[in-house]
Image (spheres, rainbow, N blue to C red):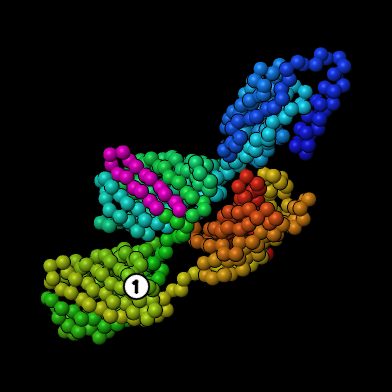
Amino acid sequence: MKYWKSKLFIAGIFIASMSLTCCDEEKENPIQGITVTPESVAPMEIGQTTQLTATITPTDADDIIRWYSYDSDIVSVTKDGATATLTALSAGTTKVFATNRSGIVVSQDILITVNSGEYAAEVAGNYLGTAKMSGALSGELSDVSIAISRISGEKSKVKLNIVADVPGMGEMNISGDNIVVGRGSTADTYTFSGGASIVTMGNIPLAVSGTLNAATKALTLNLEAEGVITVVINATPGAAVDYAKKVEGDYAGTAKVSGAISADVSELTVALTRTGAGKVDLNIVAEVPGMGQLVVTGEDIAVKAGDAENTYALSGKAVLAGMGFNLNVTGTYNETDKKLIMKLAEENGLVAIDIEATVAGDIKPNPDYGAILAGSYSGNATLTGMINETINDVPVTMERRDENSVKFTIVATVTGFGAMTIVSENMTITPSDTDGEYLLDGDAKLPVLDMPIKIIGEYIDATGELNVTLAAEGVVNINYSGSRQ
C-alpha cells in the first residue's frame, strides 16, 4: 500500500510541476541523473541508523534533492541535502530512493531490510559438545551439555546453563542470565555476549562471548575469568545422554575375590541406583564361603559412553563394609547382551573383586517421550510481523516418530491467505529440569515463501498444556498456546 502511495506521490509532483511550467521560469541547469550510494545496505537492527548519499549529474545542477521511504513505518528518512539518514523502526523490508524537486528524475531503489531482533527464538535449544580448559583447570572435556533458554518478555536475551564432568573435580555447572544475542557479521550467524559464573566453584565470574552458525548448527562459546580460567566450547544441537538411565537396575552373577581374601563367589547381587544425570549408587552383596556376607557400597559412580557401540563405562570409589577397604571401581555394561563386568581393587593391592553379572530384573526402560506427547491439541495462535492477527481454535497434532521425536503439524486459517499448514517432520523432545515437563525443538518451512522456521516449545504433562513459538526471521512469529484434547 505504502509503495504505491510513494509512487503516486511522485506522479503528483510531476503533474504539479507540469501545471506550473507556465508560471515558473524553466531552470537553465536542471538535474539530469541521480545515483545513490551505497547501492546495498546490510540488514539493520531496530533503532539502528545508517546513511545514504546522492550524487547528481551535472554536479553543478541548479536543483534540490528529495528523499523518500516506501514504508516510513519500517524505515524513516531524515534529509540533509545530498545525504539521508535512515532509522530502522520496525521489522520488515522496504526501499528508499531520491528525486529532484519536480520528481521527474528518480534514483535507483535501495533495498532496506530491518531484522526482527527476536533472536532468542533462533538460538534457544539444547547443545552437546566438547570443551578445552586452560588456566587453574586444564584439560579437555567431552559430553559438555549446553542449554540456551528464552527469557519471558525478552526478544534478544537468553539464559545459559552449562554442565560438564571435570576429572578429579566432579560436575562443573556454569550459569548465566541475560546473555545478549545479536546478529553476526555474516549471514545466518548470531553472536553471544554477557556474563556468567561457575556455580560449583564459588561463583567465579566469567565473561561470555560466542557465535552460532544457524546454517551449520555449530555453536562456539568462549568463557573467561581473566588470569584464572578459560573455557572454549564447541557444540552442535543435541541433548546430553543420561547414561545412568541405561544401566540402572538389579543384576545377579558371580565373582572372584583375591588378595587378603581369596574365594570364588557363586551368588552375588549388584544394584545400580540412579542418583542424577550420569551417576549411580552401587550396592553389592555376596555370600563368601567361610566368611559370610560381603557388602560393598559406593556413591556417585560415574557412567559414560563406552569405547564400543551400546556399551557404557563405570568408574568411581567404593568401600568394603566391615573391613574399611577403599576400592577403585571400574566396569563396563553391554546393553546388547545385558552383561555387567566390574573390577573393584584396593589401592595397595590388598584385595580385588572381579565380577561378571547379567540383568536380574528388568532395567527400567527409557521413557518414550514421543508416546507421551503424541496426540491432538487445540489453542490460540498470535501472529506478529508482516501478519498481525490472533486466531482461535487452532489445531496441532503430534505423531510419534520414535521415543525421542514427533511429527508436528499446525494448521491456521489466516485472513487473506486461507489455511496455512506448517509441518516439522522430526521435532526432538527432551525432558526439562522439572519432572513431567518436556522441551520441543524442530525446524520447518513457511508455506508459499519456502522460508525456514525455527520451532521451540514446552509441554507440561500434568496439565496437558502446550506452548510453542514458531519464528520465520523478519517475516512472521507465531506464538501458540493450547492444551491436549
Q: Identify which residue, 175 or 455, lies in the foreground.
A: 455
Q: Residue at x 22, y 72 (%)?
A: 344
Residue that numbered label 1 is attached to: 308
Q: Residues within 10 Å of mark 1 (few under 14, many from 20)?
A: few
Callout 1: helix, strand or loop? loop
* Image position, residue 395 (x, y; %): 70, 61
> Is the stretch drawn in magenta largely helix, strand or loop?
strand
Above or below, 267 relative to 447: below
Residue 374 location, quadrant: bottom right
Left or right, residue 14 beside residue 41:
right
Q: Identify which residue, 93 or 442, lies in the foreground.
A: 93
Residue 243 location, quadrant: bottom left
Left or right, residue 300 beside residue 366:
left
Q: Residue at x 17, y 83 (%)?
A: 263
Region of the chain picked out in magenta, as a range: 217-234
Residue 79 seen in render: no
Above or below, 83 relative to 169: above
Amino acid under disc 1:
Ala
